[in-house]
Image: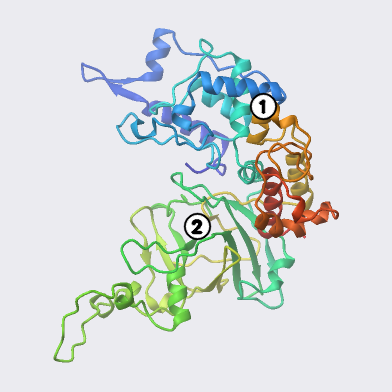
């Protein structure tokens, strides 16, 4: 469900009215009955739900939230640690009978918003059509509901909590003018410009989610270069077997002046799509195509005694995807789902390059600003081009990024699952030195039972010593501090901080 912020307020209200019109059923007499009109006629239209002001987070509220979590048996679905791995997960179905996996509070996005008010309402009214039932005032007081919200937030992994805070502020990606256009993804010249952070919203929850990509755009007046980077600890560069899923990145441009639906546009609003593929990149780097014999060394191959030409039928039939590739980027068009079509080989004019290093992909797309191809997006100075990755185009200032990190450090109490255990576990108050269970972290001073492993500490040492020159990896640090410094490390990479 993408955002439709580009619609005017009148258009959004008209859409609300139409959605309410569609909320209907057919009664026993075969008549169409609108549910909203039925409730109005019966005089049972509910009023707006009142959300009391959010109280401050305290140790007592976290302890109360954990008690409510246990009393309402939230762990049966969401798990003891909020990882979405409760014992009832295999039995959960939605109203259509399909499996309905509960939200993983640790790492997954909150689809209805991550603010306290959003979570409060989600608990209060539930999710219609899912096993998430409403918890009204008959089973939970507003104070308990807010305490449960605070406890659920404390279960968030810190790098995910950072992503919750980094919400879009602008909807434009600035295009900068340069004298020389760089096509090398790892060229240090890219680092001189601040990157725009593009949040990503997967269609379904997935492990090791990529929360955002960093984007930079430059032009020399003749060509456009689009730089993208995202974190991916395990590169997938093969798409030969049925079970292979290659890494890829796509950029969608509207061919008109109006924003097109991010799901490949529609009939009235066609789109131009640039699709970089890691398997094509690997093929170009190796200088040859995919090797079936290497993928299936024990396969049976018929013997042809006479020279034959038509071994690769797709290639001989002219299928573009089966031809030797001159670029790792496919130039295509679409007019809605199921209409994706590659442009002919003679019109494939988008070049690019992708490099995987330091657990990240960095990709550059390059194409002329303007050409005569009617199926290509045209870039004219002074005119914005609707773009999708699929959603959001924030542009952050250095002050804003500093504010986000400061907010993470000063939140009381820190959003840290271990602090909840500390609130009710007397062992945590022991004052010890060194990485021992219950000892205080030398950086934040909080007792912890979870210390970062030595290799992780050594990796983060340069970033930690910027704030604490006296610190050394041998002193150790708690898991929360490690997560915060990892967030700072990746923040600099993705947001271009100095």
Say which of marks 2 and 1 sits in front: 1
**SS label for mark 1:** loop
* 247 vs 468, nearest the viewer: 468
**Residues under numbered marks 2 and 1 in contact, where contact means CB atoms less than 8 Å apart:** no
Give the left or right position of residue 345, taking residue 308 as reference. right
Question: Callout 2: few (<14), some (14-19), or many (20+) C-alpha neighbours within 10 Å?
Answer: some
Residue 82 vs 305, above or below: the answer is above
Q: Position of residue 283 (x, y in %)?
A: 43, 77
Q: Position of residue 367 (x, y in %)?
A: 54, 73
Give the left or right position of residue 65, taking residue 90 as reference. right
Quadrant where the image shows the C terminus:
bottom right
Q: Position of residue 184 (x, y in %)?
A: 61, 75
Residue 37 vs 249, above or below: the answer is above
Q: At 66% from the left edge and 41% from the top edge, which residue is drawn? A: 165
Residue 415 vs 128, above or below: the answer is below
Q: Position of residue 78 (x, y in %)?
A: 48, 32
- Which residue appears farthest toward the right when viewing the image? 470
Q: Which residue is mark 1?
A: 425
| The image quarter in which residue 412 lies | top right
Give the left or right position of residue 231, taking residue 58 as reference. left
Q: Which residue is mark 2?
A: 256
**SS label for mark 2:** loop
* Label drawn at residue 364: none
| Separation of marks 2 and 1 at Cα, in angstroms | 61 Å
Of the numbered discs 2 and 1, the one sitting upstream in the chain is: 2
Q: At 58% from the left edge and 71% from the top edge, which residue is drawn? A: 369
- Which residue appears farthest toward the left when viewing the image? 305
Does residue 449 show up?
yes
Q: At 71% from the left edge and 35% from the top edge, which residue is drawn? A: 414
Q: At 44% from the left edge and 30% from the top edge, which residue is drawn? A: 77
- Which residue appears farthest toward the bottom when viewing the image? 306
């Amino acid at each position: 469900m993408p955002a439709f912020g580009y619609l005017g307020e009148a258009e959004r209200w008209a859409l609300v009215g139409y959605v309410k019109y569609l909320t209907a059923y057919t009664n026993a007499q075969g008549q169409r009955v609108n549910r909203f009109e039925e409730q109005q006629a019966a005089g049972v239209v509910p009023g707006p739900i009142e959300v009391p002001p959010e109280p401050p987070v305290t140790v007592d509220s976290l302890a109360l939230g954990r008690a409510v979590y246990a009393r309402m048996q939230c762990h049966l679905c969401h798990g003891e640690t909020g990882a979405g791995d409760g014992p009832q997960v295999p039995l959960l179905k939605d109203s259509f009978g399909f499996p309905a996996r509960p939200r993983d509070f640790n790492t997954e996005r909150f689809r209805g918003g991550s603010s306290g008010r959003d979570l409060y309402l989600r608990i209060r009214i539930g999710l219609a059509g899912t096993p998430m039932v409403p918890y009204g005032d008959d089973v939970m007081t507003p104070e308990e509901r807010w305490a449960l919200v605070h406890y659920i937030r404390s279960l968030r992994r810190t790098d995910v909590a950072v992503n919750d805070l980094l919400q879009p502020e602008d909807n434009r990606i600035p295009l900068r003018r340069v004298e020389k256009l760089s096509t090398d993804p790892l060229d240090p010249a890219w680092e001189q410009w601040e990157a725009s952070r593009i949040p990503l919203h997967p269609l379904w929850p997935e492990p090791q989610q990529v929360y955002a990509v960093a984007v930079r755009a430059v032009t020399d007046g003749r060509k456009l270069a689009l730089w993208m980077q995202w974190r991916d600890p395990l590169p997938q560069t093969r798409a030969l077997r049925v079970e292979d899923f290659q890494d890829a990145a796509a950029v969608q441009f509207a061919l008109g002046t109006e924003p097109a639906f991010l799901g490949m546009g529609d009939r009235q609003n066609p789109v131009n799509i640039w699709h970089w593929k890691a398997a094509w990149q690997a093929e170009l780097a190796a200088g040859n195509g995919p090797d079936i014999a290497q993928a299936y060394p024990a396969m049976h191959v018929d013997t042809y005694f006479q020279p034959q030409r038509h071994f690769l039928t797709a290639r001989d039939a002219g299928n573009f995807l089966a031809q030797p590739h001159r670029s790792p980027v496919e130039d295509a068009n679409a007019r809605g789902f199921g209409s994706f079509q590659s442009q002919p080989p003679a019109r494939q004019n988008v070049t690019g390059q992708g490099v995987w290093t330091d657990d990240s992909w960095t990709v550059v797309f390059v194409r002329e600003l303007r050409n005569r191809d009617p199926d290509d997006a045209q870039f004219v100075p002074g005119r914005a081009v609707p773009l999708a990755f699929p959603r959001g185009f924030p542009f952050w200032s250095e002050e804003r990024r500093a504010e986000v990190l400061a907010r993470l450090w000063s939140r009381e109490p820190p959003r840290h699952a271990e602090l909840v255990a500390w609130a009710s576990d007397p062992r945590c108050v022991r004052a010890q030195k060194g990485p021992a269970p219950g000892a205080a972290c030398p950086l934040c001073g909080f007792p912890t039972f979870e210390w970062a492993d030595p290799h992780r500490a050594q990796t983060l040492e340069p970033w930690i010593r910027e704030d604490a020159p006296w610190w050394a990896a041998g002193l150790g640090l708690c898991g929360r501090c490690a997560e915060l410094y990892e967030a700072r490390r990746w923040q600099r990479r993705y947001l271009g901080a100095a």
